[in-house]
Amino acid sequence: MSASVRPQGHSGFTLIEMMVVAAIVGILLLVAVPSYQRHVQAAKANTAKSDLMALSLALENHKLLHLAYPAASADSASAIRAALGNNSWQPAQTEFNYGYQPQSGSFLLTASGVGPQLSGCVLKLSGADHSANTSTSACQTQW
């Protein structure tokens, strides 16, 4: 009987192979993480847009019931809710500060980003002319 002889070598990865893999993973992370952060930022801005649209509907409902929009400006979600008579509008997230400004026969709603990731992101919704809705480039989204 002849026994097969196995060479006595070391199995495993060399240091160079490990460094190449680490470099490839590092390059992938450099590309993927900023892209992911932009998508997260755009998703939060889109949620704020939905919040503004829901608030716009709540204001229209208030006008139908009271024949006028709330007269006083409001600079927070709780102040807006109080001006609306604590209706069911509630923002879906806390990453934005919401504002309401009455205008002649209409209103202007704003959502301003809070925190380092969303600083500079400002969304505006006009009750009179929806084509005048704006968003800053920091929001990573458009109306």
Image: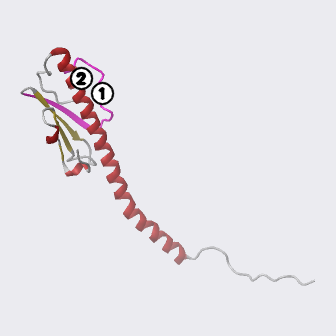
Q: Which one is nearer the viewer's eye here, 13 or 40?
A: 40
> Number of labelled discs?
2
| Residue 39 marker | none
Q: Earlier in the sequence, mark 2 or mark 1?
A: 2
Give the quadrant of residue 134. Answer: top left
The residue positioned 37% from the left and 63% from the top of the image is: 31
Question: Which amino acid type corresponds to the residue marked 1 in the rendered image?
Answer: Gln
Asked if 97 appears above or below 8 in the picture, the reply is: above
Asked if 31 appears above or below 122 in the picture, the reply is: below
Is 20 displayed left or right of 57 in the figure?
A: right
Gap in Å between the C-alphas at discs 2 and 1? 8 Å
Instruction: Say if the magenta span includes residue 29.
Output: no
Magenta-drawn segment:
83-103
Residue found at the far top of this picture: 66
Residue 133 rendering spot, x and y as whole percentages: 17, 41
- SS category of the residue bearing label 2: helix
Q: Which one is nearer the viewer's eye here, 117 or 141?
A: 141
The residue positioned 60% from the left and 74% from the top of the image is: 13
Q: Which one is nearer the viewer's eye here, 3 or 40?
A: 40
Give the quadrant of residue 107. Answer: top left
Residue at the disc numbered 1: 90
Instruction: Say if the magenta span includes residue 101.
Output: yes
| Residue 81 marker | 2
The residue positioned 81% from the left and 83% from the top of the image is: 5
Categorize mark 1 by other alpha carbons within 10 Å: few (<14), some (14-19), many (20+). Answer: some
- SS category of the residue bearing label 1: loop
Marks 2,1: beta carbons within 8 A: yes
Question: Which amino acid type corresponds to the residue marked 2 in the rendered image?
Answer: Arg
Give the quadrant of residue 104. Answer: top left
Is 41 displayed left or right of 23 in the figure?
A: left
Residue found at the far left of this picture: 104
Residue 135 rendering spot, x and y as whole percentages: 19, 45
